[in-house]
Amino acid sequence: MRKIFINELVKAAKTNNKIILLVGDLGFRVIEPFVKKYPKQFVNAGVSEQNMMGLAAGLASEGNHVFAYSIANFPTFRCAEQVRNDIDYHKLSVTIVAVGAGVGYGNLGYSHHAIQDYAFMRSLPNMLIASPGDGMELKACMKYLINFPQTSYLRLDKETDEDLHKKVPKIFPGKWIKLHKSKIKNKTILTTGAATYLAKKLISKKKYKNYSINTLPLWGMNIKKKIKKQINSFSEIITIEDHFEDGGFGSWIKESINDTKIKTKIISKYINSKIIYTVGSKNYLLNKFGPK
C-alpha cells in the first residue's frame, strides 16, 4: 500500500503544487519517486515527529495540503498533543499517514503496534478516518482526500495483498461498499481497513458462509448519523477490526445507534488485549490474538 500511496501522491502533485510530503527520517525505498520529481514539496523533518506535526500545521495554515508520513505509532500517540491542538482543533488540511496498521510491524514489538489508534483519532471532532481495505480503496481514498482537503488520518497496511475490489469504488464518508454478496441479505460482516482481509477469511468458515461483506473506508465522529439507515437494513452485523474493542470500529458502530429504536444485533470481533505481551510476525499475532 505504501507504493500505491506514493504513486497517487505523485500523480496529484503534477497539477497541485500545494501538496507537501513530510517524513520523519523514514520511508526510504518508498518515497523516492515523489522526492525526485518534487523536491521543493518535500521535507525530511528528522527523528522529531512532534516537531514534524507542528511544521505540518504551519504549512497547512498557509494553504497547503500536507501529508505527514510515518510508522503508525509515531504520528499518533507520540504526537497526540500536536495532532489535537495544532491540527484538529484548527481544522487544518493535514493528512496524517500512518503505515503499519494493526500489527503490521509486529516483529518490532508492542511499541510499534497500531491497535489503539482508532480510539484516539475518532475522539477528535474534525478528524476524518480514511482506512482503505485494499489498493483500490486506497486509490479511492486518495482521490477523495485530494479533492476535499481536510484534517484526516490515512491508515495503511504495511504490505499490499491482492486487490479485493475489481475496480476503484466510489466512496464518500459514511458510505458502505459492498465487497461480497450472499443469498441471505439481512446478515453482513462490516469492516474497515486492513481487517478486510480477515473478513474474507471469516466467510470461508461454514458458520459465516451466508454473510455478505461491506467495508467502510471513510468514517469519524461526525459521520455516525449517516450510517443508521444502513445499519437498520440488517438484522445482524458482525464488525471485524485489527484494533482493541474499546474505542475501536465496532464500538463506534454501536455508539451510532444509541438512543434509537434500531434492533440490529451487532457482534464485535477484535484483537485480544493480551497481544501486548507477545512479539511475532503479523500473521503469527493475528492467528493467536486476532478476530476469530
Image (cartoon, rainbow, N blue to C red):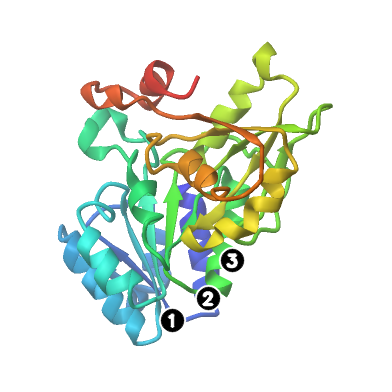
> Of discs 3 and 1, which sits in the foreground?
3
Q: How far apart are marks 1 and 2 (CA)?
A: 10 Å
Q: In which quarter of the image is residue 36?
A: bottom left
The residue identified by callout 2 is 14
Q: Residue at x 27, y 28 (%)?
A: 107
Mark 3 element type? helix
The tag earlier along the polypeptide, 3 or 1, is 1
- In depth, the one of 255 and 37 nearer the eye is 255
State the mark number for residue 144.
Answer: 3
The residue identified by callout 1 is 18
Q: Which residue is drawn at 51% across and 59% down?
A: 7
Task: Please identify the residue farthest to the bottom as the structure is shown.
Answer: 62
Mark 1 element type? loop
Which three-letter amino acid code belongs to the residue tagged 2? Lys
Q: How far apart are marks 3 and 1 (CA)?
A: 16 Å
Which three-letter amino acid code belongs to the residue tagged 3? Tyr
Above or below: residue 159 compared with residue 216 = above
Horizontal and vertical percent position of residue 256: 55, 50
Above or below: residue 288 compared with residue 127 = above
Number of labels in the image equals: 3
Q: Do the CB atoms of the residues marked 2 and 3 lie less than 8 Å apart?
A: no
The tag earlier along the polypeptide, 2 or 3, is 2
Task: Please identify the residue farthest to the top as the structure is shown.
Answer: 206
Q: Which residue is drawn at 31% across and 27% down?
A: 273
Q: Distance between the residues labelled 2 and 3?
A: 17 Å
